[in-house]
Image (tube, grey):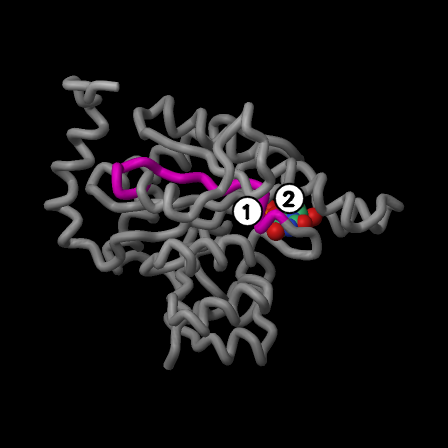
Amino acid sequence: MGANPYYPRQVINHLLGIFVAEAYKHKRVLLKLSGEALMGDKPYGIDTAMTSRIAGEVKEAHEKGLQIALVIGAGNIFRGLSAAAGGIERSTADYMGMLATVMNALAMQSALEQVGVDTRVQSAIPMQTVCESYIRRRAVRHMEKGRVVIFAAGTGNPYFTTDTAAALRAAEMECDALLKGTQVDGVYDSDPKKNPDAARFETLSYHKVLTDDLKVMDAAAITLMRENKIPIIVFSLHEKGGFDKVMRGEGTCTTIESQ
Ligand code: UDP
């Protein structure tokens, strides 16, 4: 097959952006979005206004030549643990949860492609007529070519979470940072929505997050990041341009790293 002489606009933008990327602190990152982040103001499911907004945020950073991968949860559709509590066998419920992450991944892929960002979805559970299967080297190559890779189906194993999947993929992709986009702009000493005096941590050690049981990500994810010395950055998905700022090492966030 001959090479295509026509380069789509996003490829050219991406190549130009590589020069701009020098200004960035983090050059390859994994962004973890909980399923709830896709819900917007809805009580469940996917709010396309929200997926478009997140896509715009990703595009802004991606256009500067940064390599971005996403892992998306499924709390907006299905959580294995709650379904297991309702009587479905745990592993089966977890597989159902993983399938729900694929739906979210496809919704995010659609939103990203609508704003002109080239993407690939790779699933940890093979489903070849829907998306690619997870292949590490192929995922790296996609990112090098300027595609945003969306990892679906978590780790592919029950009894895990998409937080752990995000940490695992961040380590495998040798990312500079794992970003967790949340409803608030970092980790607080108490719930900022309930306590107006809650104080935000600028930085935290992995150790403190684990010993104080701060609800940032599950313990397996934190431990994996500690072992691989990959910082976790918690920031708000609601601040416009927040993702781009955090990528430049600016903006309001909490950084969890070795201290
Ligand atoms: N899940 C799983 N293994 C994985 C990742 C996810 O079994 O590696 C299942 C699990 O049932 C979980 C559901 O998928 O409840 C959705 O993931 P998660 O709860 O992490 O989503 P989030 O809270 O980020 O929206």
Q: Is residue 86 left or right of residue 138?
A: right
Name the residue at 78% across, 44% down. 92
Q: Is residue 113 left or right of residue 83?
A: left
Which residue is denoted by mark 1 in the rendering?
A: 34
Three-letter code, disc 2:
Gly
Let me know if residue 151 is in the magenta part: yes
Quarter the C terminus occupies: bottom left
Name the residue at 38% across, 42% down. 138
Let me know if residue 188 is in the magenta part: no
Three-letter code, disc 1:
Ser
The answer to whether residue 195 shows anywhere in this view is no
Q: Is 207 rendered above or below residue 193?
A: below
Residue that protrudes farthest toward the front in the picture: 1
Q: Is mark 1 within 8 Å of ligand 1?
A: yes
Q: Which residues are magenta?
A: 143-156
Which residue is denoted by mark 2 in the rendering?
A: 75
Q: Is 162 rendered above or below residue 223?
A: above
Q: CA distance from mark 1 to mark 2?
A: 7 Å
Pointer 1: residues within 10 angstroms few (<14), some, or many (20+)?
A: many
Name the residue at 47% across, 50% down. 32
* Residue 173 drawn at (x, y percent): 38, 54
Q: Is mark 2 within 8 Å of ligand 1?
A: yes
120 vs 107, nearest the viewer: 120
